[in-house]
Amino acid sequence: MSKKTREIIGIILLGVVLTVIIIGRNNVVNAYEDVKLAEAKVQTMLQRRSDLIPNLVTTVKAYADHEETVFTEIAESRAKLANSINNSSMSEMAEADAELSQALGKLLVLVESYPELKASEQFTNLQYEIAGSENRINIARIAYNEAVMRYNKYIKTAPGILYAKLFEYEEMRYFEADPRSVSVPVVNFD
Amino acid sequence: MKRTFRSWISGLLLALVMSSFVCGIACAATIPEHTSNFYVNDFAGVFTDEQIKVMMDKAVKLCEEHDGAQVVITTISSLEGETVENYANQMYNKYKIGKDSMGVLVLMSVNDRKIRVEVGRTMQVYIPDSKAGKLMNTYAIPKLKQNMFAEGLMDLQDALVTEIKANLSGTIVEDGEEENEFYIPVLWIIVGLVIFLILLKLLESYIEEKERSRRYSSYGGWSGSSSSNIWYTSNSSSSSSSSNSSNNDSTIFSDDSSSFSGFDGCSDGGGASGDF
């Protein structure tokens, strides 16, 4: 083998190695960015529901202003959610979201004893908006968990594990909701 | 020696290309392909041909007059254990209803006695969740409760079409959000150029060598064409072809024998659902 051939083979090998590394890194980055994008969507949807709540509270207060405990609970869990969105910590968000869902559930039970409130158009509309928001959160959460699954799968199997180790990409956590908040409340008009 | 190296490199490249394209896709309930009618997918069989024709006329006209706004009605017999919200969302995104997500999907499951109005992302501006819920509750639910499925859904479709027309008349639907593919593969171009230059160099030296060997009498040469073949094969395997399968069911509504389909719509889960 002449010197020249060896040189050429060396260059090709170097090129191949570089290409392999670049492709691998791109794949990790793509999977990671998909997760980030899905995370942003979850945040947007959580925020969306959170924004509806003052409206809902005002409407309910007009008919039932003495139910202070529920309102306080809602305000507290909403503040917690806002905080977790600012910190963009997914596990905190999941927790705060579950708490808020629970508080809202209590509010909806409470509403049962106020027929005029239940029949008011404003309340009906808000109920649909909130149910829609909760469904959006659910859909965004499913998409987020799928993105996390793809990412985790990639960085835990060959060849992704190499690049993940090389560029220090770590495993991500699923958005795990409280089992109570998984089912979307369906508005019923019986 | 050279031969083994070349085959070794090409094998490596093939393995690389293949491994980087393998990707698992998770999918839950199996959403059926839409019929060639598209606007009315009567999988549960609740409509008569005449009713389908009436609904198809309305939906086709709406789409033509209002720049790709689509209202799709689908009946299924069972949700197969999936929630109506998730099923409808998956179906909406599979059918890609509405140009720029200007679409509405009405999904009714007969056995589960559930209905959902799924509203596309852009359409939510005109039909917010509360409006979707109100229309569903006013036009569909009372009739669905009496098992008048066809009538309830036809009324709901009519109400939705009227609502969309009222909102869109006189307004021009602007080209909304486009999926930004802002990833510019500058690096790839550079890498490609480097590889190309190396190849060129390689080819040059091969030709040189070949000429030399021809000049100084031959000793069982190799064919220069095989080196370029390696690259063709690895290139052709990288461009994975996706086959779009469109199934043509028997079209009840035939319009110049062309079948209908969606555009590029997607939904983030907006809309309303209810029991009946």
Image (cartoon, coloured by chain):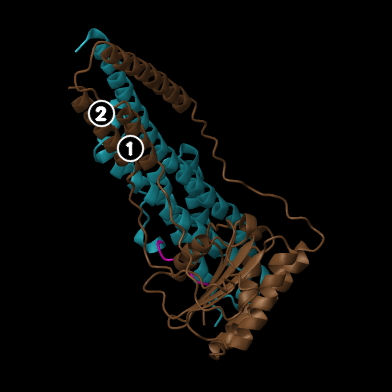
Chain colours: A cyan, B brown
On screen, residue A117 above or below B89 = below
Main structural element of the magenta stretch: helix, strand or loop? loop
The image position of residue B229, as x and y in percent, is 33, 33
Instruction: Determine whether, in the image, residue A122 is placed left or right of residue B238.
Output: right
Q: Circle 1: is it few (<14), some (14-19), or many (20+) Cα within 10 Å?
A: some
The residue identified by callout 1 is: B17
**Is B22 in front, or is B74?**
B22
Instruction: Determine whether, in the image, residue B267 is placed left or right of residue A15.
Output: right
On screen, residue A167 above or below A58 = above
**Number of numbered discs overlaid on the protein picture:** 2
On screen, residue A152 above or below A133 = above
**Is B180 in front, or is A172?**
B180
The image position of residue B239, as x and y in percent, is 41, 42
- Which residue is rendered at x = 67% and y = 63% of the image? B69
Tell me the element at label 1. helix
Tell me the tag on residue B94.
none
| Residue B226 picture quarter | top left
- Which residue is rendered at x = 73% and y = 73% of the image? B162
The residue identified by callout 2 is: B9
Residue B22 falls inside the magenta stretch: no
| Residue B17 picture quarter | top left
The image position of residue B206, as x and y in percent, is 32, 18
Instruction: Determine whether, in the image, residue B207 is placed left or right of residue A33.
Output: left
The subunit letter for the residue under badge 2 reads B
Q: Residue furthest right?
A: B170
Tell me the element at label 2. helix
**Is B69 in front, or is B113?**
B69
The image position of residue B191, as x and y in percent, is 42, 23
